[in-house]
Amino acid sequence: MTRGPAPKDNAVRRNAHPHATELPAVAQPGRELPRALGITTAGAKRFWKTWSTAPQTARWAETDWAELEVTTKLVDALYLGDLKLASEIRMRVAKWGATTEDRARLRMKFEDQPEDSEGQAPGDSDEPNLDEELYKLLSE
């Protein structure tokens, strides 16, 4: 014997957040890395490429793009050896929804991804191995 009333046949979740954001699951066209930034490291260039084409950028204003430029300069300095910038970079990218946990806190979710999309397997690109580059930097 169960307690309470029987649930309705078509129960509706009523605690949906009014400010939740649904983002497209596909990469955005992105922007070119501004030459005026003077970015020199492959890690910072990859950071820009990753974030400029991320689904989150579909809703970015010019101020968000300016923040990406500043953060990319910090990432460039990190790859040049200034390791004390790591926490600042992490704090900044968390505000954009960098990890699953960040996106949950920001109430972001991606639309369902189409079945026919094909991704490039890791290691198939001509880009340098940034894990090795970062390992060398941290082990110095």
Image (cartoon, helix red, strand yellow):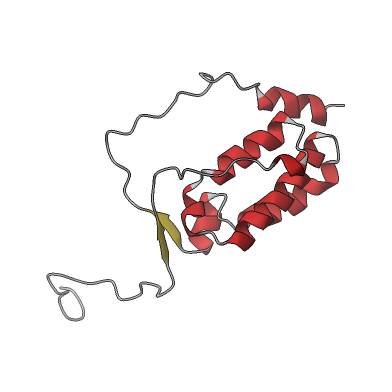
- Residue drawn 50% across the image and 53% down it: 56
- Left or right for 41, reference 109: right
- Residue drawn 75% across the image and 37% down it: 39
Q: Nearer the viewer, residue 29 or 106?
A: 29
Q: Nearer the viewer, residue 12 or 43?
A: 43
Most extreme residue toward the bottom, as rendered? 4
Is residue 55 positioned above or below 116 on the image?
A: below
Q: Position of residue 23 (x, y in %)?
A: 41, 55
Q: Position of residue 31 (x, y in %)?
A: 56, 44
Tell me where residue 102 sits by quadrant: bottom right
Tell me where residue 132 sits by quadrant: top right
The N terminus, quarter of image = bottom left
Q: Does residue 75 appear in the picture of this structure?
A: no
Q: Position of residue 79 (x, y in %)?
A: 78, 35
Tell me where residue 47 sits by quadrant: top right
Is residue 127 positioned above or below 111 on the image?
A: above
Q: Position of residue 82 (x, y in %)?
A: 86, 41
Is residue 122 positioned above or below 40 on the image?
A: above
Q: Does residue 68 appear in the picture of this structure?
A: yes
- Left or right for 31, reference 83: left
- Left or right for 41, reference 116: right
Is residue 63 positioned above or below 136 on the image?
A: below
- Left or right for 52, reference 38: left
- Residue drawn 81% across the image and 31% down it: 138
- Residue drawn 81% across the image and 41% down it: 77
Most extreme residue toward the front, as rendered? 36
Q: Nearer the viewer, residue 40 or 97?
A: 40
Q: Nearer the viewer, residue 39 or 126?
A: 39
The C terminus, quarter of image = top right
Count of numbered tags: 0
